[in-house]
Image (cartoon, rainbow, N blue to C red):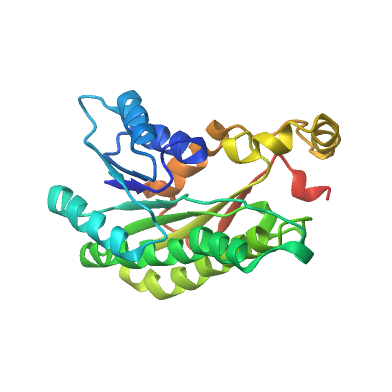
Amino acid sequence: MALVTGAGRGLGAAISEALAEAGADLILWGRSTSRLERRAATLQTSSNRLLTQRVDVTRPTQVRGALRGALRRFRHVDILVNNAGIWDGDPAVSLTPRQWDRVFATDLRSLFFVSQAVVPSMIRQRYGKIINIASTAGLLAIPHGGAYATAKAGVMHLTRVLAVEWGPYGVRVTGIAPGVFRTDMTRDLLADRAWSRRRRAEIPLRRFGEPEDLSGVAVFLASRASDHITGQTIIIDGGACLTV
């Protein structure tokens, strides 16, 4: 059973689809019921069990309540994909406390408390996979990324810390750090043709990522094939970090 947060669109939707194609049963979390229902309609097959739940992952009480309902139905969660995230960038000089708190609540704090809520069921069965979606912004100093980039750097370090703490119980914690991908979050950025042309020319593979480019790595990290990997964050950026 795989639980994916932020599953209604973008990277979360692509990862959900890949896991379903690999045979996983799915619990899809998101803040939009209509998006989740549309996603579920494309994933539902006779071989996959599927549950959608409207959950704001920044609210621990909602997280715990939704998880109790899911566990009553499915008994355990084997795979957790912490994908929910927002950008909300601004120049550092004008970044407000509210923006900072909002980004950290969604991109880092919620990741920890969702993991904390799910991991007891993994510990009981002495096995589990937690996959955290980070970003190459956590490795690079990017303009207007004061909150987002700092939170994503935190995601990568938290991945290492949880891997050390939960490894003795059979729980593997890994991360994926995408570069610039074509999603709703980056639509306005990629609409700047001059920026897009310049940035694409700096990427060795000469293209931006598509959500489906995460699918293979996500399935690998969720599978038994990666059982001796933990604490690592895999970069998927077409080689962009090599040339910046």
Q: Position of residue 232 (x, y in %)?
A: 55, 60
Residue 152, placed above or below residue 79: below
Give residue 50's quadrant in the image: top left
In the image: residue 202, left or right of residue 180? right
Q: Closest to the observer: 153 or 191?
A: 191
Residue 105, placed above or below residue 76: below
Query: How many numbered discs?
Result: 0
Please tell me which residue is depicted at 47% across the width and 35% down the height of the picture.
9
Residue 8 shows in this picture: yes
In the image: residue 176, left or right of residue 194? left
Q: Where is residue 191 in the image (x, y as percent from the top left)?
A: 74, 31
In the image: residue 27, left or right of residue 195? left
Q: Closest to the observer: 91 or 66?
A: 91
Please tell me which residue is depicted at 47% across the width and 34% down the height of the picture.
14
Residue 133, placed above or below residue 160: above
Q: Residue furthest bottom?
A: 165
In the image: residue 141, left or right of residue 74? right
Residue 127 shows in this picture: no
Please tell me which residue is depicted at 52% across the width and 51% down the height of the picture.
85
Residue 11, placed above or below residue 123: above
Q: Where is residue 222 in the image (x, y as percent from the top left)?
A: 40, 47
Q: Position of residue 118 (x, y in %)?
A: 30, 61
Please tell me which residue is depicted at 39% across the width and 69% down the height of the picture.
167
Q: Closest to the observer: 197 or 136?
A: 197
